[in-house]
Amino acid sequence: MSDDVYSHGHHPSVTNTHASRTVEDSAAYLVGHLSPGMDVLDVGCGPGSITAGFAALVAPGTVTGIDRSADVVAKASAAHAHLQNAVFATGNIYDLDFPDEKFDVVHAHQVLQHLTDPVAALREMRRVVRPGGVVAVRDADFHAMAWFPSSPALTEWMELYQRIARGNNAEPDGGRHLLSWVQDAGFTETEVSTSSWIYATDEARRLHAESWAERVLHSGFAEQTLERGHADREDLERLAEGWRTWGTAPDGVFLIPSVEVLARA
């Protein structure tokens, strides 16, 4: 399980996008359950921008961000070195290096969809939460994404992404499975909600399109596509151009819905 393959990889086109995420746009469902003095674990923290937001909300409590990529952890540590109550470390979601009942809140954002065994990960997250604490998880659902105007290139991109993710024994439509996974992990008290990211302004369209054009060409997605023979470099160039074309549409809309679950330990 520690050999899980991350479909996106850690190319700057991926991590730069992740670094723009905030508590407000990615974890608003959890904010009402945070208070000063709490101890929080952020699993799969990436560049740490959400982790840093938690640190501000729970101070003088502590926030620990873990990620399996040492390079990403190093960048998160450097970017947020000014925070007195946040630390970053490498870690394995299936084998968390913490004692039982260590944290008030354990959070994972857009993580479970990439795992071969999300239920095992949730059980481990539950182990380190104090009685009455909260495990909070949020995942997008790729097949529920929608865009306008229609684009054969984006349709082909979606099919390719599904092949890559499922080839990694992961579930790209994780959002719709989230409640089931949480229940299978033994949680009985849950609160389910949904929220979305939408790209529908000139700047938002441009940034989203350019991010995915770069991912299609250079990220782990590109490497896995080429290694497995799902497409060639010319195909990827065509898909990248399709993304950039969509990004110039003055009436373009791209919707990414996520399901989020609060589960009481």
Image (spheres, helix red, strand yellow):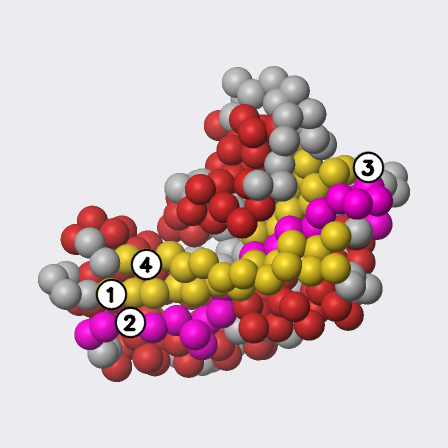
Question: Can you identify the residue that label 2 sits on?
Answer: 147
**Depth order, front residue of 104/117:** 104
Question: Can you identify the residue that label 4 sits on?
Answer: 198
Label disc, if present, on residue 123 of the rendered structure: none
* Within-10-Å neighbours for mark 1: few <14, some 14–19, many 20+: some
Q: Residue drawn 43% across and 74% down?
A: 144
Q: Amino acid at mark 1?
A: Val
**Depth order, front residue of 151/21:** 21
Q: Amino acid at mark 4?
A: Ile
Question: Can you identify the residue that label 3 sits on?
Answer: 102
Q: Residue drawn 42% across and 47% down?
A: 25
Q: Main secondary structure of the magenta part?
A: strand
Q: Position of residue 85 (x, y in %)?
A: 63, 22
Quadrant where the N terminus is found in the figure: bottom right
Q: Is residue 264 visible?
A: yes
Image-based side of 241 in relation to 256, left or right: left
Per the image, label 2 sits on a secondary structure element best described as strand
* Within-10-Å neighbours for mark 4: few <14, some 14–19, many 20+: some
The magenta-colored residue range is 127-149
Q: Earlier in the sequence, mark 1 or mark 4?
A: 4
Q: Quick check: marks 1 and 2 in contact, CB under 8 Å?
A: yes
* Disc 1/disc 2 C-alpha distance (Å): 5 Å
Q: Quick check: marks 1 and 4 in contact, CB under 8 Å?
A: yes
Q: Position of residue 130 (x, y in %)?
A: 82, 41
Q: Quick check: marks 4 and 3 in contact, CB under 8 Å?
A: no
* Within-10-Å neighbours for mark 2: few <14, some 14–19, many 20+: some
Q: Position of residue 226 (x, y in %)?
A: 45, 72
* Disc 3/disc 2 C-alpha distance (Å): 42 Å
Q: Quick check: marks 3 and 2 in contact, CB under 8 Å?
A: no
